[in-house]
């Protein structure tokens, strides 16, 4: 007997046959899907202890957010849109201004936002930029992991080392007392490996750990720390390979993929984020090495230069979509990022035929699972896979009339249309409400820890509304 039968909905399976089943059903036993088909057939063969009526809904695999940053959820909008001020907040918070309580509160807030938007698997780099990681001590990563566990979603947490020269200054807090201390590359690497030992593939396989190093650009090869940057990248990449982990880097652009090949860190288990301004040679490098790309169409980096997604796809490279986290001006809503992705590239070509909605949907489900090495477990509705399932309420004014559901969920839906979410066969969201989580407690903890961080770092000035917020066609302060 099945534990749960979801029936009477439109199944958008994203399985190898890309089936769309108008009156479809999914049967679940334990944490696995055991059947996908018509409601009549599945209900006949799999009577269940609990039935969920999905009438008027799409039954889909949970979304995969392939690139985001832990910590960002508590630094939304700070700096009023100025990247230099916002990055100042990130750099301070992720090195000298945060406590384990900060990381726990942010992890819960970000995971709860993902849950409510139907994101069942998400990547979180333990810090911001490509070189501000909170890996001086395992306590911060531990707190993040515990926070995610409390929400119940699936997470890939990327930890690693920062850019040389080392040591770097970090700080811990006891009440209002701050203690600074130096942190070496070896200490960061040891911290990262401890987090791998403690958390990778634990808690019913809901937690995974990836390793990262900063992206090496030409300016880093021209500086005094070039030798260390190359050696450290190779060492971390080797450890990731030995331990069967995804190796990832953030902020690739304009020549850095070619440098990564020369260093020797590309391959089927390497995931590069942003990848803007790539040359034809670099696109070919990704294809030849089996390196995957995560595109963040809503990120500031995508404004500064284009990720050649369509060219990468045509070369045979697997490309997924990432949110780049919930700050400074984004959300975890993957419907938003799908729509942004389609319009971004169609605008580039001045041609609406590029990136059909089905491809965009693949990029944040099965393709996202592939780039994380999890496509055998999640990313589609197939017997034997983990029961990560979302129900999207299609009986809404902006989603009517009731035809072509595969178009409606990509073009018109948003995260607030997600009605029900299951992760590993466990119902975590029902009727848009978290089942096992006190949402108010999560929100209150996030506000408290944000205020404490602001006071520690003296960042109150970053909450001022910019002078040119109203009545101007351009905020020129953003480019000064």
Image: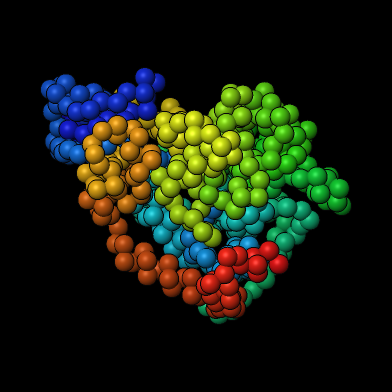
**Residue at screen point 29% across, 47% down:** 398
Looking at the picture, tell me which residue is in the foreground, 164 or 181: 164
Question: Where residue 404 sits: x, y (%)?
Answer: 29, 31
Is 279 left, or right, of 20 in this rendering? right
Residue 443 figure quarter: bottom left
Instruction: Give the quadrant of residue 270.
Output: top right
Between 209 and 353, the one nearer to me in the picture: 353
Residue visible at 33% across and 38% down?
408
Residue 267, how many percent across, how many down? Answer: 65, 29
Count of numbered labels shown in the rendering: 0
- Which of the image's four quarters has the N terminus? top left
On the image, the x and y values in percent for residue 454 come to: 54, 74
Say if residue 147 shows up in the picture: no
Location of residue 290 (image quadrant)? top right
Q: Residue at x 57, y 31 (%)?
A: 310
Is 159 rendered above or below residue 448? above
Q: Residue at x 65, y 69 (%)?
A: 477
């Amino acid at each position: 007997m099945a534990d749960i039968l979801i029936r009477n909905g439109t199944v958008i399976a994203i399985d190898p046959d890309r089936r769309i089943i108008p009156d479809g059903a999914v049967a679940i036993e334990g944490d696995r899907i055991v059947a996908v088909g018509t409601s009549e057939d599945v209900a006949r063969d799999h009577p269940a202890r609990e039935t969920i009526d999905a009438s008027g809904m799409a039954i889909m695999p949970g979304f995969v957010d392939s690139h985001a940053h832990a910590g960002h959820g508590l630094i939304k909008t700070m700096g009023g849109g100025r990247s230099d001020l916002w990055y100042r907040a990130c750099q301070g918070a992720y090195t000298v201004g945060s406590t384990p309580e900060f990381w726990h509160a942010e992890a819960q807030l970000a995971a709860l936002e993902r849950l409510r938007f139907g994101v069942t698997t998400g990547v979180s780099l333990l810090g911001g930029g490509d070189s501000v990681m909170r890996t001086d001590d395992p306590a911060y990563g531990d707190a993040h992991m515990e926070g995610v566990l409390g929400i119940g979603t699936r997470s890939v947490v990327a930890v690693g080392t920062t850019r040389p020269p080392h040591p770097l200054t970090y700080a811990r807090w006891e009440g209002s007392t701050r203690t600074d201390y130096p942190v070496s590359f070896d200490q960061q690497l040891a911290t990262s490996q401890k987090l791998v030992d403690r958390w990778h593939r634990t808690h019913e396989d809901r937690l995974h750990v990836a390793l990262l190093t900063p992206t090496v650009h030409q300016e880093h090869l021209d500086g005094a720390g070039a030798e260390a940057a190359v050696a450290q990248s190779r060492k971390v990449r080797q450890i990731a390979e030995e331990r069967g982990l995804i190796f990832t880097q953030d902020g690739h652009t304009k020549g850095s993929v070619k440098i990564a090949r020369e260093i020797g860190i590309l391959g089927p288990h390497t995931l590069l984020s942003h990848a803007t301004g790539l040359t034809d040679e670099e696109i070919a490098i990704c294809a030849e090495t089996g390196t995957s790309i995560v595109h963040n169409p809503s990120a500031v980096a995508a404004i500064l230069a284009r990720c050649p997604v369509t060219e990468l796809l045509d070369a045979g490279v697997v490309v997924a979509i990432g949110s780049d986290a919930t700050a400074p001006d984004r959300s975890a809503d993957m419907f938003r990022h799908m729509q942004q992705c389609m319009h971004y590239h169609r605008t580039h070509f001045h041609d609406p035929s590029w990136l059909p909605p089905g491809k965009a949907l693949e990029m944040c489900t099965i393709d996202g699972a592939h780039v994380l090495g999890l496509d055998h477990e999640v990313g589609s509705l197939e017997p034997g896979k983990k029961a990560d399932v979302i129900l999207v309420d299609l009986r809404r004014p902006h989603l009517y009339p009731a035809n072509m559901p595969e178009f409606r969920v990509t073009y018109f839906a948003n995260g607030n249309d997600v009605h029900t979410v299951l992760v590993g066969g466990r119902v975590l969201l029902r009727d848009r409400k978290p089942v096992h989580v006190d949402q108010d407690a999560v929100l209150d903890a996030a506000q408290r820890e944000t205020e404490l961080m602001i006071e520690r770092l003296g960042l109150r000035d970053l909450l001022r509304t910019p002078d040119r917020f109203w009545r101007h066609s351009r905020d020129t302060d953003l480019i000064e």
